[in-house]
Amino acid sequence: MDAHRIGVTLALAAAMLLVLAAVALIYRFVAFCLADLAGAPVVAVLPRETWRLLIVFVIPLGGFLYLRFGRPH
C-alpha cells in the first residue's frame, strides 16, 4: 500500500470512530431522558406519553424540550 492509501484508510477509520461516538452519545442522552421521565412523579406541559414520543422520535430536540419544559421545577 502506498502512503496515500494508508492516510485515507486512517482518516476513514477516524471518521467512523467519531460517528460511532456520536451515536453512542445520542443513545445515552435518549436513555437518560426516558429514565428521567419514567421516574418523575409528575410532568409539566404535555402528558407523559406525548413526552415519551417526542423524546424517541424527535432526537435530540425532544429530549432537550423535555428537560427544559417537561421536568417539574
Image (cartoon, rainbow, N blue to C red):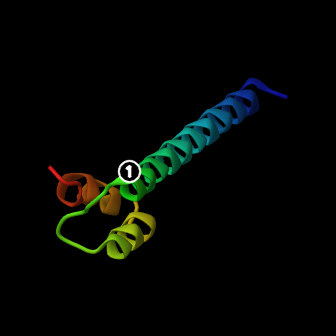
Residue found at the very far front of the displayed protein: 41
- Where's residue 7, x and y in %? 68, 28
Q: Is residue 43 left or right of residue 30?
A: left
Residue furthest to the top in view is: 3
56 to 25, vertically: above or below:
below
Quarter assignment of residue 4: top right
Q: Residue at x 45, y 52 (%)?
A: 35
> Which residue is pictured at 74% across the width and 28% down the height?
6
Which quarter of the image is occupied by the N terminus?
A: top right
Mark 1 is surrounded, within 10 Å at the Cα level, by few (under 14), some (14 to 19) or many (20 or more) other residues, namely some
Foreground: 60 or 31?
31
Secondary element type, mark 1: helix
Residue 51 in the image: x percent, y percent? Answer: 33, 68
**Of all residues shown, which one is farthest toward the right?**
1
Residue situated in front as seen by the camera: 14 or 55:
55
Q: Is residue 55 above or below residue 16?
A: below
- For label 1, the residue is 36
Which image quarter: residue 14? top right
From the viewer's perspective, is residue 5 above or below residue 46?
above
Residue name at image x 43 percent, y 56 percent? 34
Name the residue: 23% across, 54% down.
Answer: 71
- Picture layout, residue 11 above or below residue 45: above
